[in-house]
Image (cartoon, rainbow, N blue to C red):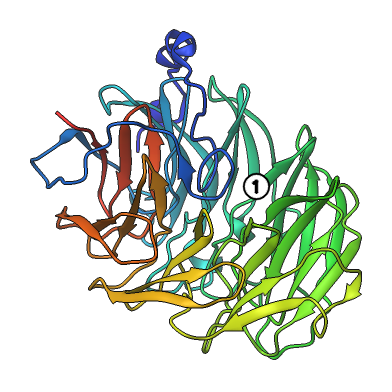
């Protein structure tokens, strides 16, 4: 990629500042991190030619999900370095929401093939999703490093201080809490959760995982919840989920779940319960009451099930029901308070992307590029199916009244015409 491409041309960004919408899609799973969106009029059906406002090629590889702010879409990608077989330029890319045209690209890190651990075939070198807050974009490449970039494309800080030995590559996305950028570093050895000063990238706190498990690696994104005025950072890892004080990293409570590892789904908090999946080999879904202290494994797990729980997609709660899709394509609806299964249906295909609730509909996107839309409720009601014909592991983004879908090679704006 030419060096000139490493400088942002963000005139479009500032031109679009006046077009901000009420709830921008600035982080993984949306404004509240739970897969809910406000976007009236989304289409129920599309194809590579139907209801596609635009389709834009995306360079390199990456499974980070699209985020949107001020008329600009941000993605991370690992772009092969010309003449350097196996080397990647780890970049932040930006595109116009209106046209899909590229408006910026900046290199954050350079990944050297000689020193780069192998990744899982379903992973990429750019899987964590970017976060936009104000005039800053935060990007994370797991063990490769973390950075803060201005809207003009200037790298304000970057750090590789927290390098660790990964297994299968990077995955989990950070979240922002006040003046902290918080994420987990669950690699081969000595896993921990860390809070960085979001203004400098310096470590403010670092909390080791307590569980002693044989496989320590996981890829989760934490969830911030509020329990009777107390904020808790819910962070699953191999063998355990812990609630931490987000400002200090001090552990508040913990639930152990044996040898569960490679935990991926982002926790969801709804109706007074925290919902967590426990990873490989056979995932359990746990419903936990978050009002305890210390080890609450025996006292605060309200219900659990290993029936069709996902390894990869995150969970979705709408009203009193929890919706999920297993990696092998079986979707389920459960009662949030009891775990009672209302229905199970095989959608077809395999699943990595997390489901989305928007405009009274639930969208499930398969790895094969197929989407199934259902009506929420205690009886299964399929409304529509769509096919793009490209591999899709990233979760949806939402802008205005349109869906953003990242496939293996393209970014789509799906919008009713």
Say whether residue 315 is visible.
Answer: no
Say whether residue 347 is visible.
Answer: yes
Q: Residue 194, relative to residue 399: is it above or below?
A: below
Secondary structure type for disc 1: strand
Q: Residue 114, relative to residue 37: is it above or below?
A: below
Q: Is residue 286 left or right of residue 43?
A: right
Identify the residue position indicated by label 1 in the image: 146
Q: Position of residue 269 (x, y in %)?
A: 65, 57
Q: Is residue 271 left or right of residue 130?
A: right
The quarter holding residue 404 reads top left
Residue situated in front as seen by the camera: 295 or 103:
295
At 30% from the left and 66% from the top, the residue drawn is: 380
Residue situated in front as seen by the camera: 98 or 380:
380
Quadrant showing the C terminus: top left
The quarter holding residue 390 reads bottom left
Q: Position of residue 267 (x, y in %)?
A: 62, 62
Residue situated in front as seen by the camera: 395 or 333:
333
Q: Residue 20, relative to residue 144: is it above or below?
A: above
- Which residue sits furthest left? 49
């Amino acid at each position: 990629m030419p060096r000139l491409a490493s400088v942002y041309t963000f005139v479009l960004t500032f031109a679009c500042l006046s077009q901000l919408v009420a709830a921008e899609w600035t982080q993984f799973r949306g404004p509240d991190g739970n897969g809910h969106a406000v976007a009236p009029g989304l289409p129920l059906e599309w194809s590579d030619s139907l209801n596609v406002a635009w389709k834009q090629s995306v360079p390199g590889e990456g499974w980070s999900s699209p985020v949107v702010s001020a008329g600009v879409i941000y993605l991370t990608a690992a772009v092969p370095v010309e003449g350097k077989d196996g080397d990647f330029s780890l970049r932040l890319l930006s595109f116009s929401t209106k046209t899909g045209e590229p408006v910026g690209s900046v290199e954050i890190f350079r990944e050297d093939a000689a020193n780069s651990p192998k990744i899982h075939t379903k992973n990429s070198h750019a899987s964590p999703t970017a976060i936009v807050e104000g005039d800053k974009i935060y990007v994370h490449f797991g063990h490769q490093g973390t950075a803060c970039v201005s809207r003009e494309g200037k790298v304000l800080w970057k750090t590789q201080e927290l390098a660790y030995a990964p297994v299968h590559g990077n995955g989990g996305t950070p979240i922002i809490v006040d003046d902290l950028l918080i994420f987990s570093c669950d690699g081969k050895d000595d896993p921990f959760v860390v809070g960085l000063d979001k203004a400098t990238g310096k470590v403010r706190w670092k909390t080791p995982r307590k569980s002693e498990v044989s496989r320590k690696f996981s890829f989760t994104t934490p969830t911030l919840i509020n329990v009777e005025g107390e904020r808790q950072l819910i962070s699953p890892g191999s063998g355990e989920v812990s609630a931490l004080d987000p400002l200090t990293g001090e552990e508040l409570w913990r639930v152990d779940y044996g040898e569960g590892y490679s935990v991926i789904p982002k926790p969801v908090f709804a109706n007074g319960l925290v919902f967590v999946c426990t990873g490989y080999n056979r995932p359990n879904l746990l419903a936990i009451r978050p009002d305890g202290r210390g080890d609450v494994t025996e006292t605060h797990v309200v219900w659990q099930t290993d029936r069709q729980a996902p390894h990869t997609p995150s969970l979705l709660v709408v009203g009193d029901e929890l919706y999920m899709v297993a990696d092998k394509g079986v979707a389920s609806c459960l009662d949030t308070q009891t775990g009672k299964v209302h229905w199970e249906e095989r959608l077809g295909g395999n699943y990595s992307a997390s489901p989305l609730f928007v405009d009274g509909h639930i969208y499930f996107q398969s790895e094969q590029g197929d989407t199934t839309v259902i009506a929420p409720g205690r009886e299964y009601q399929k409304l529509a199916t769509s096919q793009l014909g490209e591999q899709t592991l990233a979760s949806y983004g939402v802008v205005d009244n349109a869906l953003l879908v990242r496939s293996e090679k393209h970014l789509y704006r799906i919008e009713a015409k």
